[in-house]
Each structure stands twice: as structure tokens, then as C-alpha cells.
Image (cartoon, helix red, strand yellow):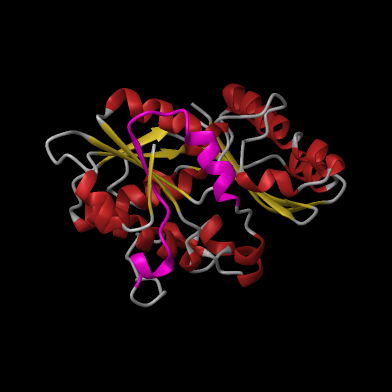
Amino acid sequence: MRVFSSHKELLKSLDSSKLVGLIPTMGSLHKGHLSLVDRALIENDQIIVSIYVNPTQFNDINDLKKYPRNLDRDLDKLKHYKDIFIYTPSDKDLYQEVISKKYDLDNLDKILEGKFRPGHFDGVATIVEKLFNIFSPDNAYFGEKDFQQLSIIKIMIKKLSINVNIISCETIREPDGLAMSSRNKNMTEEERLIAGQINKFMLKVKEIYKKTKIYKIPDNIIDDLKNLKNCQLEYFEIDNLSKYSSFLKDEGDRIFVACWVGKTRIIDNMTLK
């Protein structure tokens, strides 16, 4: 493991004749992130893990301030991996001015997460484009927990003709089904138990979908989720994101959910295939 805060210095260590795999993260690493590293190591000769809390994708300054950060702990989790490069830049190493570009994302940035986090996906696309342009990876790895983000990155590279393979990786879950997330550690023990029930609601919808192919979440299931203690629902919907853009392959209908449990915002999704 080698750690760089300067992309120019890291580039000097890359072998341009070998395959490069990139894993963009905002740190506070968990088993979900490490599963991306494990896969990337199988499919590439050189791995770059970026650890950077990108300010342009936060529409709430308080959310940016409280986002969990512990670089020493992250590096400790990565120290056992051989032949990987860790990129831990400052804002200045990536931005001349810390603002996001504006992208044409076929209105996929206006629904679901985009509706509740205006400007978020412009910030995501900005930082991912920067990383792709700097390191020219052959493959880039993203978890399906942020499926809308994954879809937007696929649109962005097609529209900008960026030559990189986007590898989507299965969501890694806790034993009770809660999707692993850096924010989960912000919950109290009671809130954590409540959050663990969200996956059960999605599974219930999936069972109904198998029998009747519904396109709207039943009202009684939405009401039951809303009635969870300390749970504030933002959306719980069935959608097929490929209908928004010709650049997306049809991967079928999915459930998408976002809610607050206490002061922690949780997002998740599940395929209905």
C-alpha cells in the first residue's frame, strides 16, 4: 500500500502498460468498500482507492460537516492489500475553484435522490469526471446501493465519450439486511434496530411483485413504514431508470427508498427481477 496526496506524484508510480482499476470513495470504509477492492484486485494489475469527501455533492453544509471521517482507520483497513495506491487529496489537488459543473443527465438527476438533494448529482459527476480524466482507469467500481448514482455515471461517460468500463457491484448488507453505509455508525442502538426493518419492507414488495407485477408500492406498506418509530419517509417507489435515458441498458424495475431514522438518512434499492 502506498499513499499519495498529490495526483501528479501518484501518476509517476503507475505503469501505463498495465490495467488500472479505480475505486472512488469518501472514506469511512466498511466491508462494502472492501468488497470493491477485492473484486478490482482480481480484474486489474494496479488499483487506486481514492478517499475524498467531495464538498460539491453536498447540498446541506451540515451534512458535509458531520460526514464521518477517520483516515487513519481507513488506511488501517487497507494496509493488508498489496500493490494498491491510496489517493487522499486536498480540495486544491482536484479543484481550482470548489464548484460543480452542470451536466445534461437526461433528467435522471431530477427524480428520487435528485428531487430531495438538488445539485447533488452534478457534484458527483464533477468529481468522478475529474478522477477519470486524471487517472484514465480501465475499470471503475461502484456499489449498487447508490444505483441512481451508478446510472448517472454511466450516462455521463457516454455523453462525454470517456473510455472506462463501469463495474457495478452487489450491495453488501448487514445480517439483518440493512445496506452497509458510512452513515450507519451515526445511529443509536434503538435507531439501528429500526433501520434494519427497511429491507423487510422491500422484500415484502418484491414478493407481491412476483405474483402481480405491481408498479406502485401498496398504500398499506407505505403506511406501515411511516409508522415505524423515529422514521420519516421521503420516498418509496418502483421505477425503471432506463426509461429516462437511451444510454442506459434496461435492467428492469427496482424498488427505491429513502428515509430518515432519527438524524441519519438511509437510502436503499432492490431489483425486482
The magenta segment is 70-95
Q: Is residue 48 above or below residue 204?
A: below
Quarter of image, res 81: top left
Residue 50 is left or right of residue 131, and the answer is right
x and y percentages locating residue 83 in the rendered image: 32, 31
Give the farthest residue toward the bottom.
97
Q: Is residue 13 visible?
A: yes
Asked if the magenta segment contains residue 158, the reply would be no
Residue at image point 41% right, 74% down: 98
Q: Nearer the viewer, residue 208 or 3?
A: 3
Residue 219 is left or right of residue 137, and the answer is right
Q: Is residue 238 visible?
A: no
Q: Nearer the viewer, residue 171 or 67?
A: 67
x and y percentages locating residue 241 in the rendered image: 43, 46
Residue 215 is left or right of residue 263, and the answer is left
Q: Is residue 41 above or below residue 16?
A: above
Residue at image point 49% right, 32% down: 34
Residue at image point 65% right, 27% down: 208
Residue 220 is left or right of residue 127, and the answer is right
Asked if the magenta segment contains residue 76, the reply would be yes
